[in-house]
Amino acid sequence: MEYFIQQSINGLTLGSIYGLIAIGYTMVYGIIGMINFAHGDVFMLGAFMAMIVFLALTTFIGGVPVVLALLLMMLVAMLLTGLWSWTIERLAYRPLRGSFRLAPLITAIGMSIALSNFVQVTQGPRNKPIPPLVNGGVTIYGTGITIAYKQMVIVIVTAILLAAFWYLVNRTTLGRAQRSCEQDRKMAALLGIDVDKTISMTFVMGAMLAAVAGTLYLMFYGVISFTDGFTPGVKAFTAAVLGGIGSLPGAVVGGLLIGLIEALWSAYFSIDYKDVAAFSILAIVLIFLPSGILGRPEVEKV
Amino acid sequence: MSETQTLPKTGALLSVENVETYYGNIRALSGVSVHADAGEIVTLIGANGAGKSTLMMTIFGMPRARKGRVVFAGQDITQLPTHEIARLRIAQSPEGRRIFPRMTVQENLQMGASLDNLEFYDEDVRKVFDLFPRLKERINQRGGTLSGGEQQMLAIGRALMARPRLLLLDEPSLGLAPLIIKHIFEAIKELNKSTGLTVFLVEQNAFGALKLADRGYVMVNGIVTMSGSSKDLLANPEVRAAYLEGGRH
């Protein structure tokens, strides 16, 4: 039982990161019906931004409190990654809007390759380690269950971010504009909503969440490489589909589930096959529950 | 009177001049010219598929006119982005109502008021509720779950929330009970009288529309075939034969 709980905690930590990335997939899909395959690499880019901030802090200032360092890493990574994503959308996706459906998809795959190669060339192909930022943990009294402080950081940051994000989407003018574009872009334009700008903002918001996920990932594993966008990216995409693509709560639920499945599978079966488990879930979901756990069916009442 | 008017009236709030619109290669409007003066109620009548809704959407640049121009309050808006056209205070209750299905009635109305960032929301929503008390009862219900009539009221209410100078109504009577139609038409008349709101009304319900409007246009196959005062059109034998007698009274 202890082992199960321990693995579940590990799974939820991992799942939080997937959930944060999955929101970016699901939001973009919701608003323009496109799978942004470059999103995993945007996440990787975010992790690199955080690493660069970390290096800058330790090189030029040194001895910054960990909380402040993490906060700075997150904020700068959010800002810069948001800017990256805005540029990508502006240059690569917007000109293709209104062209045939596959065009932006292919472009997104191209953009994914371009981004990872760009990072490979500029940052080098080797793994980039950073020293551990957050050490230690607590053992729950009377059991062998340990919760590392860095796991707590991940869960708490994710929870705060999701609450802020929920507020933004449901209670602000920007959020309302986004939801209106998701439901009927033409009508939104008739009401004076700048649809292009709203779509841009959606990309920026998704990228910001991915940047935080990247920062947390870097803090948790202490290492990042240019290939690290792919696997978490595809897992997060799986999470988005599992939760019901287009549904924001679905992305979070899907992320947590994928994290749990992966951790528990590694614990009880084979760690080598953990990716197989996660992607088998994708296949099974697509067969038996095509609209996901919280997604709506494609057919809509007219 | 059976000639298409091509000369725009100067000083018109809205004037559509010799507009041609295409869907792909299919011409939907050819040489259409209509105008609406400030404070007028103008109606455009015609059968299904005549191009009435296309004209309404062309005013907003969706699709864009390939020839001719659209002028609003002296400004050429033919090439303006749709959302900027809306920001000039032209509001539309479009064909098919286009209620946001997964937003509540309140959020739909807030969308209408988003031009002013909800500054006048409380004030304006009261007026809309006076007009359509039904919406008040449904305030927290999702748009997609409303009946057709309620959606129509919401579409008009949402358009009014934008504080429009020009209100485009695309078949507000579609799918509504006669009593509600009467109510809506009276509401339009009242708004026009009390606030001087200019209304451009597209209708299949020719009789009701002409009764309400000051002037009217008749559209057939993407061409304006007749225009004149509502009184003249109502008395015109061609109009009577095609749109009034045997139709809805």
Image (cartoon, rainbow, N blue to C red):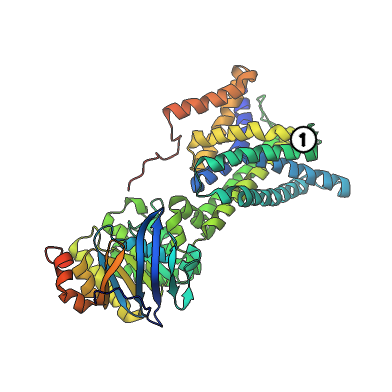
Helix, strand or loop under label 1: loop
Three-letter code, disc 1:
Asn
- Compared to residue B111, the image places residue A127 above or below, namely above
Position of B203 with respect to A226 (left or right) is left
Q: Could you tell me which chain the residue with mark 1 belongs to?
A: A
- Name the quadrant of the C terminus of chain B: bottom left
- Name the quadrant of the N terminus of chain B: bottom left
Tell me where residue B117 appears, x and y as whole percent: 51, 67
What residue is rendered at 61% in x and 49% in y? A89
What residue is rendered at 54% in x and 42% in y? A103
Of all residues shown, which one is farthest toward the bottom? Answer: B11
Of residues A265 and B160, the one drawn nearer to the viewer in this rendering: B160
Position of A296 with respect to A217 (left or right) is left
Tell me where residue B141 appears, x and y as whole percent: 35, 54
Residue B57, quarter of picture: bottom left
Residue B164, quarter of picture: bottom left
- Compared to residue B142, the image places residue B78 above or below, namely below
Tell me where residue B28 appears, x and y as whole percent: 35, 59
Q: Is residue B176 visible?
A: yes
Of all residues shown, which one is farthest toward the left? Answer: B246
Of residues B124 and B44, the one drawn nearer to the viewer in this rendering: B44
What residue is rendered at 32% in x and 56% in y? B96
- Compared to residue A141, the image places residue A173 above or below, namely below
Q: Is residue B158 visible?
A: no
Of residues A286 and B23, the one drawn nearer to the viewer in this rendering: B23
Residue for badge 1:
A135
Label 1: few (<14), some or many (≥20) within 10 Å?
few
